[in-house]
Amino acid sequence: MSLAKHHRDWEDMAALDPMWAVLSEPERRNGGWSPDEFFSTGANETARLRGKLLDLGLPDRFESALDFGCGLGRVTRALTVCCREVIGVDISLEMIGKAQLFTPACQFVHNPHYDLRIFQSDRFDLVYSSRVLQHQRSTKLILNHISEFVRVLKPGGVAAFQVPCNIPYLHRIQPRRRMYELLRGIGLPSRPLYRIRLTPIRMTSASVESVTGAIEEAGGRVLSADVDDFCPGVNSKFYCVTK
């Protein structure tokens, strides 16, 4: 799948059901999230992150932070309680535009690349990403993004991110996603496909060994790799990394 198709898929979801695209709980489909409920999950997630960092003996306040795959700014907004500067980046222009409307005080940037070339090295004290890397089209791209997290991280900073390490076979088949891609590819519009419960959202994993290797090759060091149980049925890890 090309970058253009990946971009198209997330523009589709940003227009169809953006909050569900970010937090895909079955009962919340078709506009089931209210903004207050949706953004409260970002506040809860940030509180858990800060608690985790304190448990590791790390600071929980930062000068600059990057929220990678920010979507509607769910976590970007929440990070402002502990970060002086927070930048959210996303591949979808539609998501970025809506995020800016929801939270005008935050900075949101469109990133149309498969890397973070728009940011210089050693730029951020904190890099955060959750429920994002799993939607990349290959393990190689997941590992490339992780290398980029380390590159843009300041020495002594923290990168915290979630990655599935194993996806059960039934999840890997992804028939609804495959059918969506096929029908969109021949020109069918996205809305009727979504109405029959087809979606372009994919799930991709990366083993703990491959993630650790990418971190170390980029000059980083793993501080922790804990079980993450946010997505039932998917074996996932939450990593904290420094350099």
Image (tube, grey):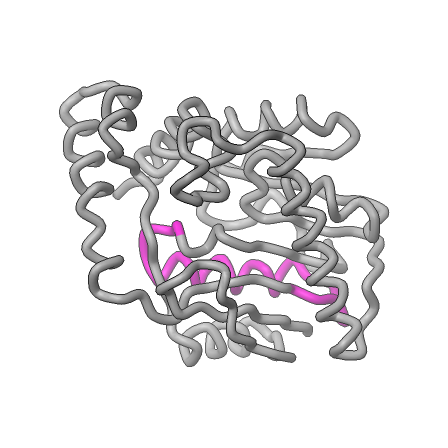
Q: Is residue 93 above or below residue 122?
A: above
Q: Nearer the viewer, residue 131 or 108?
A: 131
Q: Is residue 100 toward the left or the right of residue 198 in the image?
A: right
Q: Is residue 148 magenta?
A: yes
List x then y, in percent, for residue 237: 49, 70
Q: What residue lies at 74% left-to-right and 45% top-to-bottom?
A: 78
Q: Nearer the viewer, residue 173 or 83?
A: 173
Q: Quadrant of the N terminus?
A: top left
Q: Quadrant of the C terminus?
A: bottom right
Q: Is residue 79 above or below residue 182?
A: below
Q: What residue lies at 37% left-to-right and 27% top-to-bottom?
A: 12
Q: Which residues are magenta?
A: 135-159
> Looking at the image, which residue sits at the far front?
27
Q: Is residue 88 magenta?
A: no
- The prevailing secondary structure element of the residues shown in magenta is helix
Count the labels in the image: 0
List x then y, in percent, for residue 148: 55, 59
Q: What residue lies at 46% left-to-right and 55% top-to-bottom?
A: 133
Q: Is residue 226 above or below residue 101?
A: below
**Which of the 4 image quadrants contains residue 62?**
bottom right
List x then y, in percent, for residue 117: 56, 47
Q: Is residue 38 toward the left or the right of residue 138 in the image?
A: right
List x then y, in percent, for residue 64: 79, 51
Q: Is residue 89 above or below residue 115?
A: above
Q: Nearer the viewer, residue 103 or 170?
A: 170
Q: What residue lies at 61% left-to-right and 65% top-to-bottom?
A: 150
